[in-house]
Amino acid sequence: LDYYVYHPTDYDAYPKNRPVLISLHGLAERAGSTSRMLGSDGHGSHAWLANQGVDFPLMIVSPHQPAKVGGVSYYTWNIELVKKLIEHIKTKYEVDPSRIYLTGFSNGGQSAWQYAIEHPEDIAALIPLAGRTNLTGQIGINLQDPAYACTLTNIPMQVWHGSSDNIIPKSHSEDMVQALNSCNPSPEPPVEFNLVSGMNHDDLRPFVYENV
């Protein structure tokens, strides 16, 4: 995967054993050039915000999703390619492997959920934004099922959705959080669900990434 990397202002003084945030974009930036993340399609993404001069306190890696992998078209992220990217980042940048954080918006939010379920040992914290979790119509599984959701109870997380999202209904996040907090044992502290009143789908990303 091609990617942009953001280094915080003190990176040169402390280049090793740093935390890193992996940020997965949504469907709008999929395919084409990596530079799509810096244009209007990427509005509000970490790559877009960093290119606009916004400062962040940690290293951020923003990969770009290709249209096809090995000749096969993927609607969402190829999870094993994200895994390979994270292993690459660990080696190339000598980051702290115990402080790898994962976020994603929309399709990227769905894939962040999927990645954390498949590789919970890799992730120190999870921040999905407006991601689908009931994938019955896509791939025949529902991540809200305890067999999936309850693999995540040891990962701190914040879950975000807009109350007026007409692209991905808020129930995908709401029901997932309910499933997580119903696990036995349940997460401690309980998973935090942030439902932003009046917020639509596309405006959620800049609201969270620039202000939280």
Image (tube, rainbow, N blue to C red):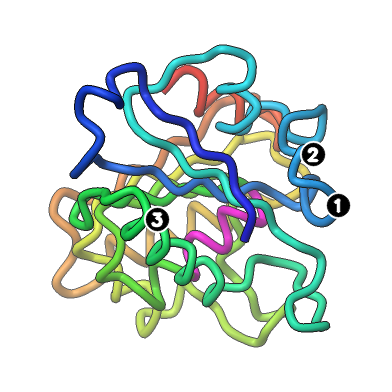
* Number of marks present in the image shown: 3
State the mark number for residue 36.
2
Residue 121 position (above or below residue 27): below
**Rendered location of residue 169, percent (x, y):** 67, 51
Farthest-out residue, right: 32
Measured in 3D between alpha carbons, the distance from the residue under mark 2 to the one under mark 3, in whole angstroms, is 22 Å
Residue plotted at (37% across, 72% down):
149
Q: Quadrant of the C terminus?
A: top left
Measured in 3D between alpha carbons, the distance from the residue under mark 2 to the one under mark 1, in whole angstroms, is 7 Å
State the mark number for residue 72.
none
In the rendered structure, are the residues bearing label 2 and label 1 in contact, judged by CB atoms less than 8 Å apart? yes
**Rendered location of residue 86, percent (x, y):** 41, 61
**Rendered location of residue 80, percent (x, y):** 52, 77
State the mark number for residue 32.
1
Amino acid carrying label 2: it is Arg
Q: Of residues 91 and 24, which is closer to you in this image?
A: 91
Residue plotted at (30% across, 60% down):
123
Q: Which residue, given by chain and number where applicable, does mark 3 sit on? A: 89
- Determine the secondary structure under disc 3: helix
Residue 159 appears in which quarter of the rendering? top left
Identify the main secondary structure in magenta.
Answer: helix
* Mark 1: few/some/many CA within 10 Å (<14, 14-19, 20+): few
